Amino acid sequence: MRCFRVSLLILSLAVAVMAIVDGCVGNTSQSTKIVTVTLPPQKYIVEQIAGDRLDVRCLLSNGANPETYDPTVTNMMNLDKSIAYLRIGNVGFEDAVLGKISHANPSLPIYDISEGIELISGTHTHYHAHDGETVEHATPDPHTWTSVKNARVMAANVLSALKEIDPANTEDYNERYERFVNRLDSLDSAFSSRLEAAGAPSFIVWHPSLSYFARDYGLTQIVAGGSENKESSVTAVRQAIDKATETGADVFFYQKDIDNRQLAALNSSIKATEVNINPLSADWEDEMIKIVDALTAK
């Protein structure tokens, strides 16, 4: 009898452990198809259309820096399990990912969800070594997702991709797409009205991450730092201060990786309201609302 009770106890513990492990892994069915995306805000957009039909996985985790990121072995394993890779289109490390895909899984479908967006140039540069020298090249602004209008284009591209790779769920994807674009249209209309009422304000930003947002609503983005989040020259800082004073910019958006001493030194002359933003947030809609709220707070 004692042996029976011990065996029963062991069995119960085994069942409990299996339940815990299953909970840690998540509720995703083993049969759920996987798609991989590049960035957290992109994951948000794809999930609005995919719902629970697909397991959407992201290469870049929250908090990672896309300018220094290198795909991990786990990232590449997820890609190997995926039925498609939906790239954002202009982020530098995607080139490395595409190179690895061409060797490891050349038949993997790849979609650029920024296709059709009019890109902005002149805000970002890329450096690389050539013949022993560092060469600078202008590159398109990669922050295409920081725009409700662009998100609408992305949503259409996502819908087209999902219907192609998973046609069995086309009806569901169509319905979720319609709900999402209706929401985007509501946000766009509300943002436009609020920002127009606020006088289309100018704003300061350390890293030029809101160029598309500024273009959407006729706003002036004043860049205090640089495209690589590096310390600005004295001349660049002086120019930013002068332009902020001239345009009456009184909101200073900054990201977590900026040196607070640089921020304080620059803003001591401007005295703008400092607002911490995260353009790479997985809560894309909340982040966009936060930006508009800051600019229309008066």
Image (cartoon, rainbow, N blue to C red):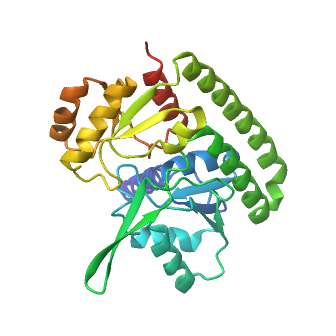
Q: How many marks?
A: 0
Residue 253 as seen in the image, left or right of residue 285: left
Which of the two residues, 182 or 115, is positioned nearer the viewer here?
115
The residue positioned farthest toward the top in the image shown:
298
The residue drawn where x is 53% and y is 57% is 57
Q: Is residue 97 above or below residue 116?
A: below
The N terminus sits in image quarter: bottom left
Q: Is residue 11 above or below residue 298?
A: below
Q: Is residue 36 above or below residue 220?
A: below
Image location (x, y in percent) of residue 260: 19, 38
Residue 246 appears in the figure:
yes
The residue drawn where x is 37% and y is 59% is 3
Which of the two residues, 285 or 15, is positioned nearer the viewer here?
285
The residue drawn where x is 78% and y is 39% is 178
- Occupied quadrant, residue 71: bottom left
- Occupied quadrant, residue 10: bottom left
Which of the two residues, 241 or 77, is positioned nearer the viewer here?
241
Residue 275 appears in the figure:
no
Image location (x, y in percent) of residue 155: 69, 48
Residue 281 as seen in the image, left or right of residue 182: left
Q: Is residue 122 above or below residue 146?
A: below
Image location (x, y in percent) of residue 163: 79, 58
The C terminus sits in image quarter: top left
Image location (x, y in percent) of residue 232: 23, 49
